[in-house]
Image (cartoon, rainbow, N blue to C red):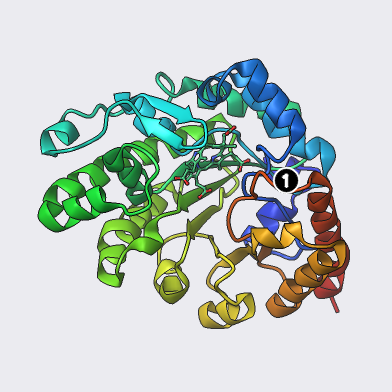
């Protein structure tokens, strides 16, 4: 429970309660930029086996926390566990990305999709969460996550990663009712999955809508945000004594931020195309804000990284409600020491913004 957490800055900031310094964690903090991650992945044999072996998933979840004084752990898994559990057959193909053995092409495929039981087909995720909670021993909170219905639908219909999204956009135009059927089914499944993650020990939840930004405004509202909002409503009371904050992240959503905060979320995560200070002004005190350094900056000099951290902290300004993060995942080409520079800079430079008078 958060009260028993030794470092509770993340949860406090997500709930806009006072903190001594701005909490920081990094999207994809356990990943290929770390040599120890690449070692464990080799030991597992492949990425899917790594995700499905709780001892190894726990090991890689902990790796970045052994290196840096991060304010949160995020469970090592992937957003594509749900489609895999629905029988699509996930593989990660080297230098191509995630691929499914089977994809969704018509309404019959959708009607035949099972609703995975999180404690059966996805038990390995829950076991990883239980293991990490034991390993963390209350040091920092553990974040659980899922993809958004829209983002998962893009992978299921395209059969993997995509650049053009022509199949899913084709279904949206030609068979919107079928697409809604799939999105509804995914919302049900994600709700069960996230509730199970909370019951297994996740202390905050993040929903990744990586591909919401490719939609036109009315389609974003109807095919992406609408379903995330339903999930948030279902999660609102999914905690015993302490609140489990929910973070929504749509990449490329600057123009929709006022609409996103109307969903029952506690925080929004923003990419580097938004100005964090302006976002704060636009939304007032409604939710906390996570973000938003461009991952590419981590390739620059120590001075440039520290300057950028300072500029983001200054732009947000005084008071709680900010969780420092990148605007998207860290890339495999980053030198691990640069992450240490970032984390220390956030902690050191943010104290001045949290002085109580
Ligand atoms: O070893 C490898 O080559 C695997 C690379 C990798 C990793 C480290 C993949 C394949 N997934 C992950 C882990 C992962 N994925 C985490 C772990 C927790 C963390 O430390 O942050 C998380 C939160 C994700 C979420 C995820 N997977 C998203 C949403 C976030 C985002 O980056 O936008 C998406 C879109 C995926 C799909 C996916 N899985 C893997 C890759 C390379 C991708 C992206 C493919 C694409 O661009 O379409």
Location of residue 180 with respect to 267 vertically, above or below: above
Q: Residue at x 71, y 72 (%)?
A: 312
- Please state the horizontal and vertical placement of residue 88, each as a whole percent of the image: 31, 27
Nearest to the observer: residue 198 or residue 177: 177
Nearest to the observer: residue 247 or residue 49: 49
* Residue that mark 1 sits on: 3
* Apparent side of residue 194 relative to residue 347 in the rendered image (left or right): left
Q: Residue at x 74, y 57 (%)?
A: 299
- Please state the horizontal and vertical placement of residue 185, each as a whole percent of the image: 25, 40
Instruction: Find out if the beta carbon at label 1 lies less than 8 Å from the nearest ligand 1 atom.
Output: no
Q: Quadrant of the N terminus?
A: top right
Residue 297 lies in quadrant? bottom right
* Apparent side of residue 197 relative to residue 347 in the rendered image (left or right): left
Does residue 202 show up? yes
Location of residue 205 with respect to 342 vertically, above or below: above
Does residue 138 show up? no
Nearest to the observer: residue 22 or residue 210: 210
């Amino acid at each position: 429970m958060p009260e028993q957490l030794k470092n509770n800055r993340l949860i406090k900031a997500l709930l806009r309660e006072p903190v001594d310094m701005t909490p920081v964690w990094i999207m994809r903090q356990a990943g290929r930029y770390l040599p120890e991650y690449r070692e464990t992945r080799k030991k597992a044999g492949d990425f899917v086996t790594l995700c499905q072996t709780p001892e190894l998933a726990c090991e890689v979840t902990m790796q970045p926390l052994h290196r840096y004084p991060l304010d949160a752990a995020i469970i090592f898994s992937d957003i594509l566990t749900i489609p895999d559990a629905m029988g699509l057959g996930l593989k990660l193909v080297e230098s191509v990305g995630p691929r499914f053995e089977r994809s969704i092409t018509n309404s019959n495929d959708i009607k035949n999709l099972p609703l995975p039981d999180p404690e059966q087909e996805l038990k390995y995720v829950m076991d990883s969460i239980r293991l990490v909670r034991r390993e963390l021993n209350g040091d920092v909170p553990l974040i659980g996550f899922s993809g958004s219905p829209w983002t998962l639908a893009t992978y299921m219909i395209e059969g993997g990663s995509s650049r053009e999204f022509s199949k899913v956009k084709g279904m949206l135009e030609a068979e919107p009712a079928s697409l809604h059927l799939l999105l509804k089914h995914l919302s049900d499944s994600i709700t069960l999955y996230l509730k199970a993650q909370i019951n297994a020990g996740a202390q905050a939840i993040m929903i990744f809508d990586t591909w919401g930004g490719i939609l036109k405004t009315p389609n974003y509202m109807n095919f992406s945000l609408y379903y995330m909002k339903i999930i948030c409503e279902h999660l609102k009371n999914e905690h015993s004594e302490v609140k489990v904050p929910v973070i929504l992240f749509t990449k490329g959503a600057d123009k929709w931020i006022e609409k996103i905060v109307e969903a029952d979320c506690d925080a929004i995560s923003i990419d580097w195309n938004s100005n964090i200070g302006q976002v704060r002004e636009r939304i007032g005190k409604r939710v906390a804000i996570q973000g938003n350094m461009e991952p590419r900056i981590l390739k620059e000099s120590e001075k440039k990284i520290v300057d950028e951290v300072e500029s983001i902290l200054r732009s947000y300004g005084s008071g709680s409600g900010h969780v420092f993060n990148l605007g998207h995942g860290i890339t495999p080409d980053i030198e691990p020491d640069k992450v240490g520079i970032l984390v220390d800079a956030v902690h050191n430079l943010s104290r001045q913004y949290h002085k109580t008078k």
